[in-house]
Each structure stands twice: as C-alpha cells, then as structure tokens.
Amino acid sequence: MTAIAAGAPSLDIGKVIGATFGVLGRNLAPFLGLTALLVGAPTALVSIGVLDLMGDPSSLNIGPETFGLFGIGFLVSIITNAVLQGALIYGTIRDLNGARASFGECLAMGLRNFVPVILLSLLMAVALVVGFLLFIVPGVMMLVAWCVAVPSLVSEQTGIVGAFGRSAELTRGNRWRIFGLMLLFVVLSWIVGLLVSPLSLAAMAMGPQGMVVSQMIANSVSGVINALIGATGASVIYVELKRLKEGVSPDALAALFD
C-alpha cells in the first residue's frame, strides 16, 4: 500500500466513523427501508422458497430446484445490491450537503446506475479473486485502492474503467487509514453476527426447517446491517477524500446529480 507522503492531507478515521453514523441516524427510515427491500427481502424470499421445496420437515429434500432457486437468488442479489449502492451514495452525498433525499429519489438514482455498477462490481470481483490468489497482499492492496470506485462511478460518471483509476487516485496517500477502517468494519460485522446468533439458534430448535429459518434470520439481519453501514461508509470516505485532496465540497458533489 502507498505510504503516506509527507504533508499529504490525512483522512481522519474518527471523523469518517462519526459522519457515517451521523448520516445513518438522520436518514434511518429511508436508508433502512431501502436496505431491507433490496437486501433483506430477497434473502428472506429465497429462504422461504427453499422451505417450501424441502417439503417434509423430517428430511432435507435438497434437489435441483433448490440449487436453481439459490442461483436465481444470487443473480437477484447482484442486481439489488447494485441498486442499493447507487441509492445510498446519492442519499449520503445529499445529506452531507445539508439536504435530505427521499426513499423514492434514492431508489430512482440507484435504478439509473445499477447496470454500470454491476459491471464495475463484477470486474472488481474477478480482479480481487486473482489478487487474493497471489498471496493475498495484492488483493488487499487492490481492495483498498478501489474502495471508492463505485461512488466515483455514480457521482462523477467516470465510466467503468475510469472508476478504477479515479479511486486509486483519490485513495493514494491514505490507504493505510482506509485499511484500518476496513478492519474496523470486519470487527463490526463479526459483532453483528454474534448479536444475531441467539435468534438463529432459537430457530434451529425447530428441526431441519428451523436450520433454514435460522440461516434466513442470520443472513437477512446481518446482511441488512452490513450493507447499510458499508455503502454509507464508502460514500463518506469518498466525500472526505474529495474534500481533502481537491477541496471539493459536498454541495459541489450534489450538483453533479442535477
């Protein structure tokens, strides 16, 4: 990762964390509603479909239809996650500009950008897999360097390839701090999993079908919370890096959406 250059503007980790939870607190209803609709609902629907296909609760009836349903659910999740990222990026930038974006406005922005976000995410995933196979370190370096690629794409319309370079440019000089924020997010995700586990353990007492119910609960709740914090946090990092490196205020960023 790039070392922090002398005199380079430094990302304030505490400020990023405070701003992230500040944005979430001020926009909890629309952001939570969007995340529940686009992450929680697809996960729950797939789990309900699996329960129906299993049939007899005394036996695990997992056949081709079940795997097919999982495949459909995976494809749907790729689309809905892309819509969510665009929606929360828009809502976060509007909030940091002192305005509020409604549920409908955020959703419309997410729908407008979901195709390029999907393509960007797929390219990034392939590159990261290759990077992690090469002794992990290259993958970590790419993950940090490209962490604001999606916000760059959505707000600046850089194009899919241009978003990689734009993110690398913005993160240069602050990648160790961003890496630290990512580690904090991993710890937070682990804590969320621990908090959700009592709910899923209770469902497992229902038998074989309870195992699916428990997985549905754990995946839906943790998925909603992690997606909510992750997308908002990446947007806050992007806005702060733009301010530090280019002196661009949130209102100037918000004007890009007009």
Image (tube, grey):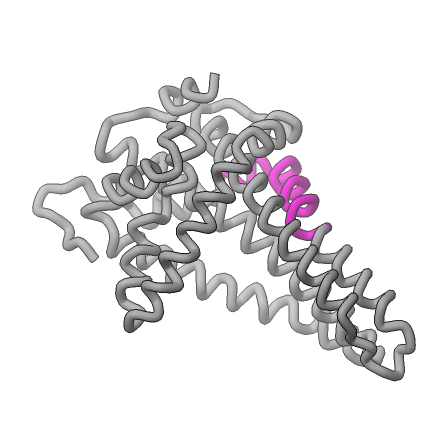
Please state the horizontal and vertical placement of residue 94, each as a whole percent of the image.
Answer: 48, 26
Can you name the residue that lies furthest to the right here?
56
Q: Nearer the viewer, residue 19 or 72?
A: 72
> Residue 38 appears in which quarter of the rendering?
top right
Residue 212, compared with residue 48, is above or below; it is below
Determine the residue positioned at 77% across, 55% down: 45
Q: Residue furthest left?
A: 6
Majority secondary structure in the magenta region: helix
Quadrant in the picture for residue 165:
top left
Determine if the magenta segment contains residue 174. no
- Front-most of 155 and 199? 155
Measuring from the top left, give residue 27's x and y in whole percent: 58, 35
Report the residue at 35% width, 67% height from top: 132
Residue 107, horizontal then vertical, whole percent: 62, 32
Residue 38 on the magenta segment: yes
In the displayed structure, does residue 66 sit left or right of residue 95? right
Q: Which residues are magenta?
A: 23-41
Task: Count numbered badges in the picture.
Answer: 0
Query: In the drawing, does residue 6 fall left or right of residue 255?
Result: left
**Residue at figure coordinates x 29%, y 70% from the top left:** 134
153 in relation to 75, above or below: above
Q: Is residue 217 left or right of residue 111?
A: right
Query: Does residue 92 lie above or below 5 as drawn?
Result: above
Residue furthest to the bottom in view is 58
Could you tell me residue 124's position as x and y percent?
40, 51
Q: Nearer the viewer, residue 61 or 230?
A: 61
Q: Residue at x 47, y 50 (%)?
A: 122
Query: Would residue 99 appear left or right of 146 to someone viewing this image?
Result: right
Is 111 drawn above or below residue 206 in the view shown? above
Q: Quadrant of the N terminus?
A: bottom left
